[in-house]
Image (cartoon, helix red, strand yellow):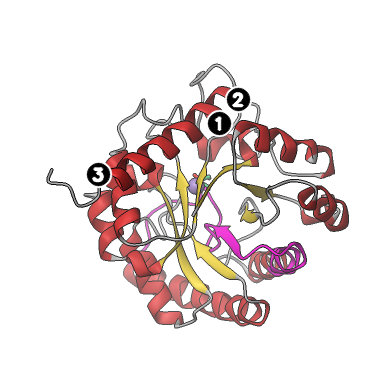
Amino acid sequence: MRFGLNTFLVSPGFTDADLPLIATFEKYGAQLVELAIVEPESVSVSKLKTVLASSRLEQPVICGAFGAGRDLRGSSSEVANAIQYVSELIEMADALGAKILCGPMYSRTGRSGAHTAEERESQFDQIALGLEKLCAKAEDSGIVLALEPLNRFETDCINTIEQAVEMIDRIGSDALKIHIDTFHMNIEEADSGAVIRHYAEYIGHVHASASHRGLLGEDQVDWTGVLGALHDAGYQGDIVIESFSRENQVIAKAASIWRTLYDSPEQLAVEGLQFLKKTWQHIEQTEGQPV
Ligand code: LER
Ligand code: MN
């Protein structure tokens, strides 16, 4: 189990210019870096590998960004782009020794609207076809694709853990898991801790994100409930803090961070990691004790 930081905190999309972030995140107390790769061609895998190897954050997670033009339920060119993009990320993950590729890869982020039951069914059929191809590639490389449900304003497609489970059961590949995000769960789930306990075996990755995307622990997420459920389920994966810089134009509309939520990315990172580690430790120490 590791605690880490997503590069969206400071960078609109990881490129070679962001390589120094790895040392910075290590200094902040991260045990892994989640690389938000918007344009795979702006990353030199060999340079990245060298920098990772010289740090203690050797095995990263890759986070996909599904903006305009990448949509498994879109036009044939959008589908082809999405497949091409995720395929390149799988290859990058493989080259870097990463085991998880996460994000809302079923559709374009920000696409949200009403559909008839028939339209929805045909969209899901189309997504399943795309995911089947990607899972076959991921299986060959031993990479897990972790699907992230998003809140209703960012997608009308997969909003809840249960909907992600339906898609995973339909595909039936060991390479497909769920990527939960406490921010989205806080909007869409009735009880985040309970749903984590119920579907624990499906969870492959976690974004720890405050209910307002600001400082962890100074928000409405029931952190003891969420982390307690992951702990009790024997979760062995990564828990990565995600927030976004206000300057991040790539994800500005989706993240909708219009006001200052913390003093600096360093504050969010350092205090957030300390908060997660302290809460996890407390859960471990009080395990089995009467409430
Ligand atoms: C991405 O991990 C995420 O949580 C989204 O809200 C960003 O669009
Ligand atoms: Mn997220």
Circles 1 and 3: CB atoms closer than 8 Å: no
Query: Which of the 4 quarters of the picture holds residue 31?
Result: top right
Name the residue at 27% across, 60% down: 197
Residue 120 image point, x, y percent: 39, 68
Residue 286: mark: 3
Residue marked by disc 1: 269
Image quarter hosting the C terminus: top left
Q: Is mark 2 within 8 Å of ligand 2?
A: no
Q: Is residue 211 left or right of residue 89?
A: left
Q: Residues within 10 Å of mark 1 (few under 14, many from 20)?
A: many
Magenta span contains residue 109? yes
Name the residue at 75% across, 46% down: 55
Q: Is residue 8 left or right of residue 203?
A: right
Residue 48 image point, x, y percent: 81, 51
Circles 1 and 2: CB atoms closer than 8 Å: yes
Stretch of the chain drawn in magenta: 87-116
Q: Residues within 10 Å of mark 3 (few under 14, many from 20)?
A: few
Name the residue at 46% across, 78% down: 125
Q: Secondary structure at mark 3?
A: loop
Query: Which of the 4 quarters of the picture holds residue 266?
Result: top right
Whole-angstrom CA distance, mark 1 to mark 2, is 5 Å
Q: Amino acid at mark 1?
A: Ala
- Which residue is nearer to you in this view: 104 or 52? 52
Whole-angstrom CA distance, mark 1 to mark 3, is 26 Å
Q: Is residue 189 visible?
A: no
Q: Nearer the viewer, mark 1 or mark 3?
A: 3
Residue marked by disc 2: 266
Residue 159 image point, x, y percent: 37, 55
Mark nearer the N terminus (3 vs 2):
2
Q: Is residue 253 left or right of residue 249?
A: left
